[in-house]
Structure formats: C-alpha cells, structure tokens
Image: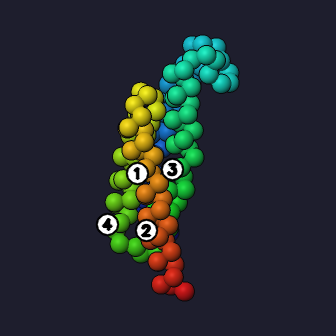
Amino acid sequence: MTVVPITSIFVAAACAGLVLLSFPIANSRRRQKLSLGHGDDVGLQRRIRAQANFIEYVPLALLALALIELAGGDRLWVWVFGGTLAVARLSHAHGLIADVLPTRALGAILTFLVLLGEAVRLAVLASASL
C-alpha cells in the first residue's frame, strides 16, 4: 500500500473542518424545522455557502496534493500547499460567516494560488516522467 502521510494529515483536518462547518447548519435547520434551504435566515445562508464553497474547492486541492506527494514532489511544497490551503479555507469560511470581506477575499485568493501552484507543480512533475 502506498501511503501519503502529509496529505493524510490535511485530509484528516479537512474532514474535521467539514464537520465543523456542517454541524451548525444541521442544528439550525432542526431548530427552525427546515428540511431544505435557509428560510429567511441570512446567517444560515452564509453558513450553507461557506460549507458549499469548502466542498467545491477542497477535494480537488487535496487530490492535487496527494498526486504531488505520490509523484515524489518535494515534501516542503506538499507542506506549503497543504498549510496554505488550510489557512485559506479557515479565512474564507470565517470571512463569509462573519461577513468580513477582506478575510473572505484573502481566503479565496490563497485558495486560487494553491490550486495554480499545484497545477504548475503537477505539470512539471508529469513532464519530467514522460
């Protein structure tokens, strides 16, 4: 079995992060007796979008991270990409939920930079093995 220990740490953190984003949504919906959507609750709407945004970006970033690690990419880059992604997603979720645009924007920009950096690193690693 091939192990990707660094990526595994970030996947574990992402699992916990998704639960932390999801639990308050489930509680709010239960309290308000909403089976779908957010009703008129703007706070709930923000939490739903933070969770959805996490789900939209994190899986591909983690997949790229694992591929870099599997390809024997420099471990420092794996840590940098993973750590930056973690900071980015925390920043974005906090900014979206608390309505702090600069924090949200920072999270979005860092997420994009991680994805672009991973894409470049994967392209370099793949071209070296062709």
Q: Which mark is residue 76?
A: 4
Question: For mark 2, what is the residue?
Answer: 69
User: Label 3 is placed on what type of residue?
Assistant: Val
Residue in front for this viewpoint, 22 or 115: 115
CA distance separating discs 3 and 1 = 12 Å
Give the number of the mark in front: 2 or 4.
4
CA distance separating discs 2 and 1 = 20 Å
Question: For mark 1, what is the residue?
Answer: 110
Q: Which is more N-terminal, label 1 or label 4?
A: 4
Q: Which is more N-terminal, label 1 or label 3?
A: 3
User: Label 2 is placed on what type of residue?
Assistant: Glu
Q: Which is more N-terminal, label 1 or label 2?
A: 2
Q: Position of residue 16 (x, y in %)?
A: 44, 40
Please, what secondary structure does the residue beneath circle 1 have?
helix
CA distance separating discs 4 and 1 = 17 Å
What colouring style does the render use? rainbow
Please, what secondary structure does the residue beneath circle 2 have?
helix
Residue at the top extreme, as displayed? 32
Give the number of the mark in front: 2 or 3.
3
Q: Which mark is residue 58?
A: 3
Give the number of the mark in front: 2 or 1.
1
Q: Position of residue 70 (x, y in %)?
A: 47, 71
Q: Is the Cβ of the residue at disc 2 closer than 8 Å to that at disc 4?
A: no
Q: Is the Cβ of the residue at disc 4 closer than 8 Å to that at disc 1?
A: no
Q: Residues within 10 Å of mark 4 (few under 14, many from 20)?
A: few
CA distance separating discs 2 and 3 = 16 Å
Q: Is residue 130 visible?
A: yes
Residue at screen point 54% across, 20% down:
42
